[in-house]
Amino acid sequence: MISLKGNGLTLEHMRAILYQDEQIIIDDCAKENVVKSRKVVERVVEEGHTVYGINTGFGKFSDVSINESDVHALQQHLIRSHACGIGEPFDEIVSRAMVVLRLNALLKGFSGIRLEVLERLTYMVNHHIHPVIPQQGSLGASGDLAPLSHLALVLIGEGFVWDGNQQIPAHLVWEKHNITPIVLEAKEGLALINGTQAMTAQGVVNWLESEALAYQSEWIAALTMEALYGITDAFHPAIHEARGYPEQVDVAKRMLSWLKGSQLVTKQGEKRVQDAYSIRCIPQIHGASWQVLSYVKEKIEIEINAATDNPLIVEDGKVIISGGNFHGQPIAFAMDFLKVAMAELANVSERRIERLVNPQLNEGLPPFLSPQPGLQSGAMILQYAAASLVSENKTLAHPASVDSIPSSANQEDHVSMGTIGARHAYQIIQNSRRVIAIEAICAVQGVEYRGNNLISPALRNKWQEIRDIVPSIIEDRIFSIDVEKMSMYLKKDTFHIQNVATNS
């Protein structure tokens, strides 16, 4: 059970909630803060003070006053009109993350929402009531208005929720649970949708998958080294300590650990003096991606504990201030940075695939790892597929955050496009996983030709796991099936807490 209180939520907590079905509760202190801020909103309505989002219109309509009798209708209209998401829905796991993150933000007690609404969000998480939320339509400022409106629709008994692979009307779910949909009161619609939780929820899933893939790329690269008689001297600790990047030092250490006891790797001068960069510079290249992962983790863990709506009730309820915490620029930058880091892991992986299949470079392995070169093509087109994916990644890696289109009659004249960046980052991660899966398929085939009894003890276990999924290439077959099976095997690592000593 994980207690939410508006701060202290971590990515490891999110892994447990998203992938290990950990239940959540609301912290008692957070409840007190929520109740206190709600009283402020009720006082504003009663006394007739003009406060944005409580008794005014939204965006360019902020100067339009709303009668007290219409403040409830104002929230309903807001949610319905802003539920303008487009295209394919987010993965259900992202939808689940979105509910958790919006709940945690509102528990900080700056938003003036009723505790009843937050208890309903908690119920949704614990009973797997996940809104169907279209991916497109957010500008990444003023909050992720369209996606979060689709989340809010479910609370009021509208919109759709996931039921397995099906989408069913939300009101049917509440009927099944014998629960009445929420009727939103003053400010609550705005509180639900004014935030960065769509881009951040996708960012959380992105980071968790990226972390797993970054670890996997190392042991798969180690298998490639064994297949190519790689030189381990390049991982000597002194080299990496001389440069000083901790992530580079750590990658080199893990590579040596994976290769300990291998009878296939070599020392400099035994077969050649030095390897190509895609082998020799694994600590430098992969280590730099780990630097990005560290940066992104820091920003995400700030954002998942941030108050991101507008206006905020501060100074113990004495002040209600309109600001701009809904602007997604920090996460937009983080997602664009993550795109580059993960694209580069795929780039260097594809170069190692080329070395495994190219008879000019693969140290005597069969051309294209073919069982009958010429008659059978072997892994030839696997390398083509990898090259296609890394090329697609280069297009997707273009930063979304450098773009901005004014909206709401130029009131909202700079936006982050962070949700687009997060979505593209997810696509890059999926592409990169498939490239690394292709490297794994080629690497295990390579070490099999060398003699799998000669590989390191740690990698022998990995070799066997892969062989249980992808059989040896003894005849040409439909390799796309192998790539998808291998990719799914790698993706499942996201479900578990990562252990730095991954070969233990």
Image (cartoon, rainbow, N blue to C red):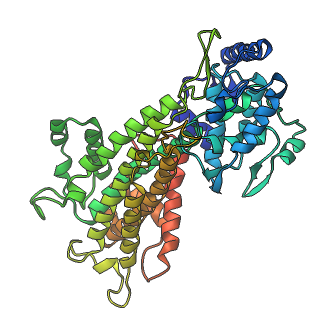
User: Which of the pair 330/84 is nearer the observer?
Assistant: 84
Residue 90 visible in rendering: no
Is residue 89 left or right of 474 when viewed as pictured?
right
Residue at image position (52%, 58%) is 489
Query: Compared with residue 476, is residue 432 higher up or lower down, i.e. above or below?
Result: above
- Looking at the rendering, in which quadrant would you find the C terminus? top left
- Looking at the rendering, in which quadrant would you find the N terminus? top right
Is residue 414 left or right of 79 when viewed as pictured?
left
Quarter of the image for residue 367 reads: bottom left
Residue 324 point in image, percent of width and height: 53, 28
Q: How many marks are shown on the rendered structure? A: 0
User: Which of the pair 420/164 is nearer the observer?
Assistant: 420
User: Which of the pair 302/293 is nearer the observer?
Assistant: 302
Residue at image position (44%, 49%) is 400
Is residue 9 left or right of 333 when viewed as pictured?
right
Query: Compared with residue 476, is residue 485 higher up or lower down, i.e. above or below?
Result: above
Residue 80 point in image, percent of width and height: 75, 43
Residue 241 visible in rendering: yes
Residue 393 point in image, percent of width and height: 40, 60
Query: Compared with residue 412, is residue 4 higher up or lower down, i.e. above or below?
Result: above
User: Which of the pair 443/430 is nearer the observer?
Assistant: 430
Is residue 391 left or right of 200 when viewed as pictured?
left
